[in-house]
Image (cartoon, rainbow, N blue to C red):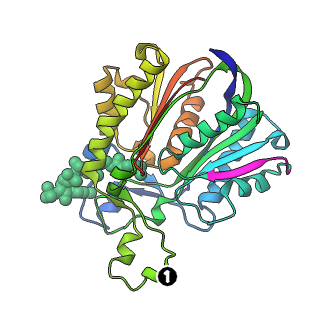
Amino acid sequence: MSQITGKIIGLGSYFPPKTLTNDDLSKMVETNDEWITERTGIKSRHIADGIEDKSSTMAVKAAKEAVEDAGIDPKDIDLIVAASTSPDLVFPSIAVTVQEALGCTENVGCFDVNSACPGWLAAFNTVQGFIESGNSKLALVIGTETLSNYVDWTDRGTCILFGDGAGAAVLKAEEGKKNEIIMRSSGKRGVCLHCENRKQPKRYDEDDFEQSTYFYMAGRDVFRFAITEVPKLIKDLAAKYNFSLDDIDYFILHQANARIIESTAKKLNIGIEKFPMTLEQTGNTSSASIPALLNEMKKDGRLKKGMKLVFASFGGGLTWDANYIEY
Ligand code: ACO
């Protein structure tokens, strides 16, 4: 159905210059390049220095590129929503930091969302709700993460997976196909992926406190959850909105693990070439992974106007979301 919707007219991304390869990791924990590559598809990841590059400053860098790519005046932006599960400030929001750095006016709604890895999709859906209801005309949607701050660098089961970075998109109200969504969550199953806040003074004297403030992940459970729920979600999306998966140009999946993406392609019976990946050089950048992947595809010419795209993500919560859009 054609109506007013948010069209992606600009994309940006940013990764900190410092990289950590699998060989570097093998000097820190008992692992090796072959194991990591075979189990995850990841070869290297970027690590923020915490000075120049934090979740907020990387968000600004990605947003600036997206604004430039869109060719818009930041003064025309009326909504900024940033997704992050690893913000450097409790408040104000990352969105406000971006507003200030870009020189936007004060006629801008700014707030952050936290939905772990599907955070950018949650932010995208929120912004689409504002645009499709006529409450925003030009918006920025950002995903930015420094999960390196939350990873236990002695735990080889998690520290090999994550990297830092940011991605951003400019959405403009235009005539087009509505954003079609399915969002799912299970608090009950969230125990397999969590991280406690460090600032809880009442818990400081408890033995397990420090450990609980690192990223906890039961890898096999998360893996099983992802390879079961993500293909099912995409099939349900196609059934709900009555489209054929064969007509989709690209499936833009959260870049967590190549084996999860390959398994999803197989279960959907769709060629793996329709599932682009960036994770080899970035690792899992959580809420930044989808906009950063879109930006890379735009730059190398794969992404073209009018393409039919399915986005799908999964992560802490547990939450898992999918969208069908026309780019
Ligand atoms: N190097 C070498 N050996 C390792 C490593 C490592 N880095 N990590 C674990 N091992 C060992 C284990 O100790 C185990 O040894 P054992 O058999 O002697 O006990 C063996 O390898 C197998 O361990 P598993 O945990 O079963 O390995 P698996 O094949 O499940 O791979 C992995 C682990 C890569 C973490 C996988 O479970 C996975 O990708 N899970 C999903 C993770 C994910 O996507 N997380 C993101 C979720 S959402 C978000 O983004 C927040």
Magenta span covers which residues?
106-112
- Report x, y in % for residue 269: 30, 20
When asked about the image quadrant of residue 255, the answer is top left
Q: Looking at the image, which residue is at 55% across and 56% down?
A: 17
When asked about the image quadrant of residue 227, the answer is top left
Q: Is residue 290 above or below residue 112?
A: above
| 264 or 303, nearer to the observer | 264
Give the residue number, with chain letter if any, for mark 1. 201
Residue 254 visible from this viewpoint: no
The quadrant the C terminus occupies is: top right
Query: Given the image, on which type of amino acid does mark 1 rest?
Result: Pro
The quadrant the N terminus occupies is: top right
Q: Residues within 10 Å of mark 1 (few under 14, many from 20)?
A: few
Q: Is residue 6 above or below residue 192?
A: above
Q: Looking at the image, which residue is at 35% across and 43% down?
A: 257
| 317 or 11, nearer to the observer | 317
Residue 282 relative to residue 288: left or right: left
The secondary structure type at the circle numbered 1 is helix
- Report x, y in % for residue 93: 67, 58
Q: Looking at the image, which residue is at 82% across and 49% down?
A: 104
Residue at the front extreme, as displayed: 188
Q: Looking at the image, which residue is at 67% across and 27% down?
A: 7
Within the magenta stretch, is there residue 217?
Answer: no
Residue 112 visible from this viewpoint: yes
| 4 or 13, nearer to the observer | 4
- Report x, y in % for residue 302: 53, 24
Q: Is residue 27 above or below residue 324?
A: below
